[in-house]
Amino acid sequence: MSCYETIKKKYENLGVDVDAAIEKALQIPVSMHCWQADDVVGFETKPAGLDGGGIMATGNHPGRATTGDQARADYEKAMEYIPGTLRLNVHASYAETGDEVVDRDALEPKHFKTWMNWSSEKNISLDFNPTNFSHPLAEDGFTASNKSKEVRDFWIKHIIASRKIAQAFAENQGNPCVVNHWFPDGSKDMPADRWIYRKNLIDSLDKSIANETSVDKNLCKDFVESKVFGIGSEEYVVGSGDFYNCYSVSRGIGLCMDMGHYHPTETVNDKISSILLFNKKVLLHLSRPIRWDSDHVAILNDDLKNVFLEIARGDAWDRVYLATDFFDASINRVAAYIIGMRAVRKGILYALLDPSDKLKDYEDKGQNAFRLALMEEMKTAGFSVIWEKLCEKAGVIAGAEWIDEVEAYENNVLLKRV
């Protein structure tokens, strides 16, 4: 009997079908974020954006993608080593308009034709995000919540335009496009009026998403994402966790929970059962926060495992959308994708191998010591052998051998961009 068959038998004794777990782990889609490859710079033509309030990626590792073609080449290289069903999450600032300057409120599906053609060629579905940052009209720290009606109207138009692009993606790929809405709005110090910005944001979201009827909501799946604080919004964030919890439930819009967008003592896994008792679906942004929302590359740590265990134990896979969200400019960006995405797929597999029924049985009987004992034993229950089998089925390298190949890609491709 092979090592795999031996381990498989041990899982079967605990009520776990290993073969079925592998198949399901490969089928669950994970949307890979586009912005690790280029440090969230985007490819839109100046002067439409790229200046003003925004997001910062730290580090200066050589080889950053500076064109859409370079980024897509990097995605393809990373995907060679990532098992399972993949999607790609694209930002509005990744529009490719050639020499034409198109501001974000005027973007159309035609400006993403190259992305859609690539999507069809590679059989990879796309998700989308409005880019509500890195723009002159984000410079004062407020976008859709701005006190200026002119500024708010610009971002409302941008959101509507983005949702129409998402619908075009969905029609092109034959399945819905997930659209996540995040705003950097907030202030560094204490505002005198916290109310006005949140009222403005509600009004903008209602006009651009909740009450906007030009987009088919069966094709465009909207989610709103909160944050604790950011650079320039250390004291006050308009779109807080409380704000979006209430807004999403009251408007029937999905909630996005980013693993790094909560206080250090909060864990996303504990929130999943609460949120899904009130929301139909949730979008999870998978990353590794260190001290604050630093969006480090995801790794197979307890936080990641526990998120997927919570989903598995609640049998909520069909109610959760999964996407990565990290960017680290201090390391090889292609390797960062592979590390993070493989960690996510490992986390999914780990959770699907959980003997949940046995654990719940111990719990029902009050045998909590045995429950804890089995949880501990499962941490070293031959997982690596099952991971190797999953990779074998997916036709990708299971071990660390991929590192040599990506190092060669760095030398032959990335470093030549410098």
Image (tube, rainbow, N blue to C red):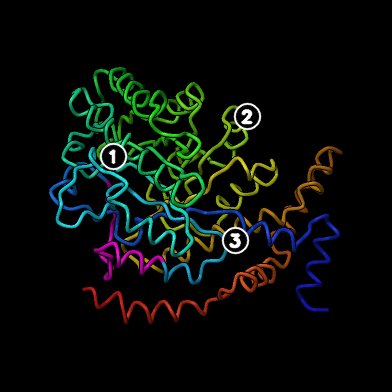
Camera-nearest residue between 120 and 27: 120
**Residue 187, position in %: x, y?**
25, 31
Front in this rendered view, residue 106 or 204: 106
Residue drawn at point x = 84 percent, y = 43 percent: 361
Residue 132 disc label: 1
Upstream in sequence: badge 2 or badge 3: 2
Residue at mark 2 to residue at mark 1: CA–CA distance: 30 Å
- Which amino acid type is marked by label 3? Lys
* Secondary element at tag 2: loop
Q: Residues within 10 Å of mark 3 (few under 14, many from 20)?
A: many
**Start and end of the magenta stretch?**
55-75
Give coordinates of residue 329: x percent, y percent.
Answer: 31, 61
Mark 1 or 3, nearer chain start: 1
- Contact flag, marks 2 and 3 (Cβ < 8 Å): no
Q: Nearest the camera: 290 or 42?
A: 42
In magenta segment, residue 59: yes
Can you say whether 46 is above or below 299 in the image?
Answer: above
Residue occupying image coordinates x 46% and y 45%: 177
Residue plotted at (27% across, 32% down): 157
For image coordinates 32% across by 82% down, the residue present is 412
